[in-house]
Image (cartoon, coloured by chain):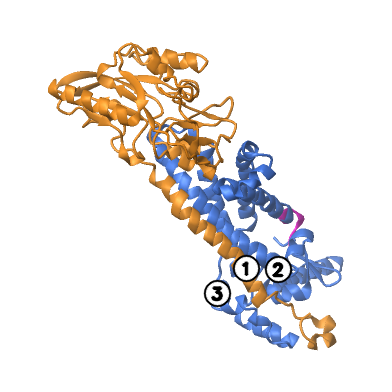
Amino acid sequence: MSEQRILPGGRVLRYTLRERILHWLAGLSYIYLLLSGLAFWTPWMWWLAIFLGGGPVAREVHPWMGLIFTFAVVYMYVMWAPDMRITDQDREWRNFIGEYVRNEEEQERDPHKAIRTYQQFAPVGRFNYGQKYLFWVMFWGGIALFVTGMILWFSEYIPWSLRFLRLMSVILHPIAFLVTLAGFIVHVYMGTAVVRGGFTSVIRGEVSVPWARFHHRLWLEKVEAEQAAADNNTMAARK
Amino acid sequence: MTTQALEVKNASAGAASPGIRLTEPVAKLIDTSTCIGCKACEVACQEWNDLPAETTVNLGTYQTLPQMTPHFWNLIRFIEVEMNGQLHWLMRKDQCMHCSDPGCLKACPAPGAIVQYQNGIVDFQQENCIGCGYCIAGCPFNVPKLSGQTRKIYKCTLCVDRVSVGLEPACIKACPTNCLSFGTKDALLLKAQKRVDQLKSSGFEAAGIYDPQGVGGTGVVTVLAYADRPEAYGLPANPTIPMSVVLWKQPLKWIGNLAILGGIVGAFLHYLRYGPKHVPEGEKSKQAAGGGPA
């Protein structure tokens, strides 16, 4: 599994190139879907449709972007589902979510104590509970958006006797949109403003070792252990 | 007919420009009891609106097509039903009903793509239409049709171009039995009531007017000999704007707007109060770490 590895200079490879590409395929297509979708959601945001080339263009492109987003989300599922399983550690971490939100894990200024205090209450693997939750919200939200979106895309082919499908989609599509948007807002805010280094990690793929130890200690230890084992093997082979 | 003012009183996605002139709502009266099924109205509609001919479909009746299409806006439905042990041959003119409270207009996200004129005519403005098909979901009468060719929606305009210059719609002009008439809605309701009374005195006890209040009444008023059974004519008994469209456009939209705003404001406030997380410096900068956040 582990293409993630310790890099020279105190860095760790957190996201492989493939993971980064998929993340941005999903992210950028979602942003387009969000902007064009907001234009269809309320006339107050209609100017976004003008900005995207006019209403008819936005309407034509929106479902195709939806297919790209769905592809990316399903691919991410295949890639990340094992990492995204909610574990007992996550359930323990959840008890300290208030401390996490209030940044209380860093109140202890002594660096070693700080790490220890935080890690005591909640050692985190590759992804924390919030990240996993976001993943499942976007995955199931994406599936719901895909199914209802396909119905709305081919609305005119749905016979009158099956119109409940159309009527269901009209209300479920925006509900799923709102749910994913809640996840999206938190994700972008956390990834850029709160957890510094998160944004660059999903662009260049690398984080520093202290960053990894602070935010994802169990993951760092696993990568280190795997690396050590691999190195030992190489050493053994050389002998 | 006097010339009708074409001020727009209501438009999709909040693009209305309400007028000040007093304009009486107009209506079309369809007296199904005097329709002979000649389909002159179908031809007149195609001719006046310069609509391309459709290949007809043989349904085993005189009916031209199974349903309306993007370029066939006026369809006489031929219905054979058994009621009280008798076979009834019913004919009904299927077209846009020009609802006072149009579901299509409510569902439409494109500003000004659907307008309702001061005189009650509901009309699609193809230059503003984005072809999303939400109006199809909003309509309780299965009227709007999306053209695969142009990706726009089309339907009966109630000949707004004729009405605005004081002419009656083409179908009404063509009707040989006066089963169709046109005028102000008030006048036509009186006329319809007279016809209903006549029908009742001739033994059609259940005769009545179909002007469903669930959509605020319609600009197409229909006299039915069996008004207790509108479904027999293929009309919904109590049409309303679909619940999901209403929920979407009213509570959900406002809850959603507040939630989106709340999310953005909440994130901003969180940042003002708590700010970013600081990763404690690692082994390398042990000495420097005492002096506050990195």
**Upstream in sequence: badge 2 or badge 3:** 3
Which residues lie in the magenta part? A15-19
**Do tag 1 and tag 2 residues touch (Cβ < 8 Å)?**
yes
- Chain shown blue: that is A
Q: Amino acid at mark 2?
A: Ala
Q: Position of residue A5 (x, y in %)?
A: 77, 65
Q: Amino acid at mark 3?
A: Arg
Which one is nearer the viewer's eye here, B201 or A101?
B201
Asked if residue A17 is among those painted magenta in the image, a careful observer would answer yes
Disc 2 from disc 3: Cα separation: 21 Å
Q: Position of residue A15 (x, y in %)?
A: 73, 61
Task: Indicate the chain on which mark 2 is placed.
Answer: A
Looking at the rendered structure, the secondary structure element under dot 2 is helix
Q: Amino acid at mark 1?
A: Ala
Of tags 3 and 1, the one toward the viewer is: 1
Of tags 2 and 3, the one toward the viewer is: 2
Of tags 1 and 2, the one toward the viewer is: 1
Is there any visible trace of residue A140 in the rendered image?
no
- Chain shown orange: that is B
Residue to which mark 1 is pinned: B267
Q: Is residue B241 above or below residue A220?
A: above
Q: Is residue A64 above or below residue A181?
A: above
Task: Indicate the chain on which mark 3 is placed.
Answer: A
Residue to which mark 3 is pinned: A94
Residue to which mark 2 is pinned: A193
Which quarter of the image is occupied by the C terminus of chain A?
bottom right
Disc 1 from disc 2: Cα separation: 10 Å
Which quarter of the image is occupied by the N terminus of chain A?
bottom right
Q: Position of residue A119 (x, y in %)?
A: 65, 80
Looking at the rendered structure, the secondary structure element under dot 1 is helix
Asked if residue A158 is among those painted magenta in the image, a careful observer would answer no
